[in-house]
Image: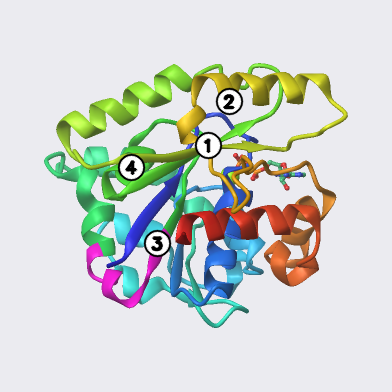
Amino acid sequence: MSEVIVIANQKGGVGKTTTAVNLAASLAVEGKRVLLIDADPQANATTSLGYTRNDYEFNIYHVLIGAKKLSDIILSSELPLLDLAPSNIGLVGVEKEYYDSGQSKGRELIMKKAIAQVKSQYDYVVIDSPPALGPMTINALSASNSVIIPIQCEFFALEGLAQLLNTVRLIRKTINPSLAIKGFLPTMYSSQNNLSKQVLADLRQHFKGKLFTDDTDDCIVIPRNVKLAESPSFGKPAILYDGRSRGSVAYQNLAQAILA
Ligand SMILES: Nc1ncnc2c1ncn2[C@@H]1O[C@H](COP(=O)(O)OP(=O)(O)O)[C@@H](O)[C@H]1O
Ligand SMILES: [Mg+2]
């Protein structure tokens, strides 16, 4: 049985793409067949795997408007078990276009239906979502078994979280009753920074049972680590750029927690 996991938080710059790419890669290195879907018009996940926009003709936009099947757009990656459904800046028009196209009924389910056609070929589908609670994120949440919410260990970290959790509740009530919160993931943690410590303490207090833990029962925290920031510019997930870096190891631990 395959599992669909969306990485979501409507705030930008909290580590969604970094989490999607490195979780997907770490699961693939663990021997799982993984499809990473880039559902953000900024296409950062696509770039992070080494693709530039002239390398491919079709993207998730063509799938969402019904012009292509998901299987038509899938690209391979440097990791044999990791595939990518790319995005493109062209996606910017998609929200308006499919609201205007008259297929209002069931429009939240387009991604779910697209995934259904390829699902049997993968153990995990990981979706990177844009920094908004718009139709793209609603589609991704509607298509998923669970959501991982990265929380940046900075000031205002928990701001907007209530709105995201309300959206999850609403989607459960309407289109996707079994959508689970897989966990909150503290990102960009810096042990020298008191604010970071405070945010982590807050998360431990409010979401104790919903933090990922490693095999020694420690809470999994993604450290601020320059290798995670550098690897996208080499078109590689961190595990292929510097697999022993603290950042990459943290994502490998996350993958193991998910497999456990
Ligand atoms: N743990 C980390 N350590 C250092 N830099 C990080 C870390 N996580 C993300 N970044 C960097 O921070 C920026 C925002 O991260 P990103 O994953 O793109 O966030 P989002 O997808 O939520 O907008 C990117 O430049 C990324 O490389
Ligand atoms: Mg992103």
Element at badge 2?
helix
Element at badge 1?
loop
Which residues fall within the magenta stretch? 116-125
Nearer-N-terminus badge (4/2): 4
Q: What residue is at 81 percent from the left and 20 percent from the top?
A: 194
Q: Are marks 4 and 2 in contact (CB under 8 Å)?
A: no
Q: Which residue is mark 4?
A: 141
Q: Say which quarter of the image contains residue 238.
A: bottom right
Q: Quadrant of the N terminus?
A: bottom left
Nearer-N-terminus badge (1/4): 4
Percent from the top left, x then y, of residue 110? 23, 52
Task: Work out how far the residue at label 1 is from the one at label 3, CA to CA, in angstroms.
Answer: 21 Å
Task: Work out how far the residue at label 2 is from the one at label 3, CA to CA, in angstroms.
Answer: 28 Å
Nearer-N-terminus badge (4/3): 3
Identify the amino acid type marked 4. Answer: Leu
Percent from the top left, x then y, of residue 17? 59, 49
Identify the amino acid type marked 1. Answer: Leu
Q: What residue is at 22 percent from the left and 33 percent from the top?
A: 172
Element at badge 4?
helix
Position of residue 210 relative to residue 63, above or below, is above
Nearer-N-terminus badge (1/3): 3
Tell me, for residue 204, which label it has, or none. Answer: 2
Tell me, for residue 125, which label it has, or none. Answer: 3
Tell me, for residue 140, which label it has, or none. Answer: none
Tell me, for residue 211, which label it has, or none. Answer: 1
Q: Is mark 3 within 8 Å of ligand 2?
A: no
Position of residue 158 relative to residue 39, above or below, is above
Percent from the top left, x then y, of residue 214? 60, 50
Q: Nearer the viewer, residue 174 or 39?
A: 174
Position of residue 47 relative to residue 136, above or below, is below
Marks counted in the figure total 4
Q: Is residue 13 left or right of residue 118?
A: right
